[in-house]
Image: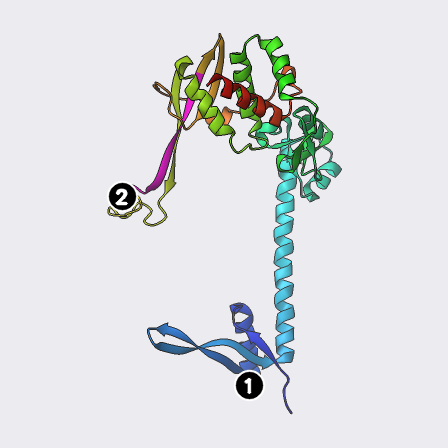
């Protein structure tokens, strides 16, 4: 009686081993499907790419293999779920078990108040509105305050709000507040620099560097914030004669500097890859600490595009 055969592609070694063993133990025949592959210059050798095996054995073992995989997936999912529950409980002890379970099942991030804001690129809808952005997608996280939950929205889903505020009107308002175009420009650079963490304006950093150069004589201190280097992918520092890194293991490097500048009695601090006029040998501030929260007195902010446009306008007039 003819035996119905199924094609078993080579690849899953566990499944293949089980099926072929059952065939041998039962005295059932199977056949190999091969093709010739290159094994060297002008050399070829046969390689098994599939087996033709009895359909009944094939389907039984495939079902068994899939059941094992599903059980493993379930076990890993439960382990991840339990770990997430433990993490949420430890972090937010005041939440009820029901809320913890709901948060653990969600695919959203769960954060405390010290983990949200423009510097983390995730915040509440009302916070983004204070920075003149609107949300365009569903929330991606939860903010936990005591026992209350608030929706959080990612910065990548923001759009700047429409505004009637013009560059000239902002200039007029800030000039009344700061009494000096030099300080107005410095404040525009400072605010635009912070908003870069939310939405990147492509030419802003060049604008900031131009302003730093223009005010280099106002520098009160320059420091090295950090040195950055890219590892050589060709030799990883193991070849003294490597043409990419000359044996250093570093393919490229650059230095980030801290500039402390005094503008009409107001001190500002910025970071740039432009070297300051003079350097303090001591290192700069701890970089992870940068990006402090906005103060209530600083909110709401003008739209980012208007602030950058004001900085661009004043800088062109002063240089």
Residue at the (55%, 14%) spot, across then down? 184
Residue 130 horizontal side relative to residue 193, left or right: right
**Given this view, does label 1 or label 2 mark the residue nearer the observer?**
2
**Residue that appears at 44% across and 21% down:** 212
Compared with 300, 147 (above or below) is: below
Residue at numbered disc 1: 29
Residue 299 image offset from top left, x and y in percent: 65, 19
Left or right of 22: which side holds 137? right
Tell me, for residue 247, which label it has, or none: none
Front-most of 169 and 206?
Answer: 169
Name the residue located 63 percent from the left edge and 53 percent from the top edge: 75
Give the residue furthest to the front: 317
Q: Residues within 10 Å of mark 2 (few under 14, many from 20)?
A: some
Identify the element where label 1 is drawn: loop
Q: Is residue 114 visible?
A: no
Question: Is residue 154 placed above or below 24 in the rendered structure?
Answer: above
Observer-nearest of 276 and 114? 276
Q: How many marks?
A: 2
Q: Main secondary structure of the magenta part?
A: strand
Task: State the residue at coordinates (54%, 73%).
Answer: 16
Task: Identify the residue at the far left of this view.
Answer: 241
Q: Image quadrant of residue 12?
A: bottom right
Q: The N terminus is located in which quarter?
A: bottom right
Q: Is residue 85 covered in magenta?
A: no
Q: Which residue is mark 2?
A: 246
Residue 256 location, x and y as percent? Answer: 41, 28
Magenta stretch in the rendered image: 246-260
Residues packed near mark 1 inside 10 Å, few (<14), some (14 to 19) or many (20 plus): few
- Residue at mark 1 to residue at mark 2: CA–CA distance: 60 Å
Q: Earlier in the sequence, mark 1 or mark 2?
A: 1
């Amino acid at each position: 009686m003819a035996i119905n055969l199924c094609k078993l592609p080579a690849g899953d070694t566990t499944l293949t081993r089980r099926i072929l063993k059952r065939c041998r133990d039962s005295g059932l025949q199977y056949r190999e499907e091969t093709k010739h592959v290159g094994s060297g210059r002008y050399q070829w050798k046969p390689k098994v790419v599939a087996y033709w095996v009895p359909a009944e054995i094939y389907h039984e073992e495939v079902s068994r293999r899939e059941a094992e995989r599903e059980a493993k997936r379930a076990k890993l999912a439960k382990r991840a779920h339990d770990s997430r529950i433990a993490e949420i409980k430890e972090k937010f002890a005041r939440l009820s078990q029901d809320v913890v379970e709901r948060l653990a099942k969600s695919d959203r991030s769960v954060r405390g108040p010290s983990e949200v804001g423009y510097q983390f690129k995730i915040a509440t809808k009302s916070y983004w509105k204070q920075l003149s952005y609107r949300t365009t997608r569903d929330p991606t996280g939860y903010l936990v305050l005591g026992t209350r939950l608030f929706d959080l929205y990612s910065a990548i889903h923001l759009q700047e709000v429409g505004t009637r505020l013009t560059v000239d009107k902002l200039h007029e308002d800030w000039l009344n507040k700061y009494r000096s175009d030099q300080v107005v420009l410095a404040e525009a650079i400072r605010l635009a620099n912070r908003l870069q963490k939310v939405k990147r304006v492509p030419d802003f950093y060049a604008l900031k560097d131009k302003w730093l150069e223009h005010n280099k004589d106002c520098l009160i201190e320059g420091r090295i914030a950090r040195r950055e280097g890219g590892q050589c992918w060709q030799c990883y520092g193991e070849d003294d004669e490597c043409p990419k890194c000359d044996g250093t293991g570093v393919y490229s490097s650059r230095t980030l500097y801290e500039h402390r500048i005094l503008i009409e009695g107001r001190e500002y601090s910025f970071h740039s890859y432009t070297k300051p006029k003079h350097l303090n040998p001591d290192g700069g501030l701890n970089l992870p600490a940068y990006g402090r929260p906005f103060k209530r007195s600083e909110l709401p902010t003008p739209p980012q595009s208007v602030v950058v446009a004001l900085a661009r306008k004043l800088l062109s007039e002063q240089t």
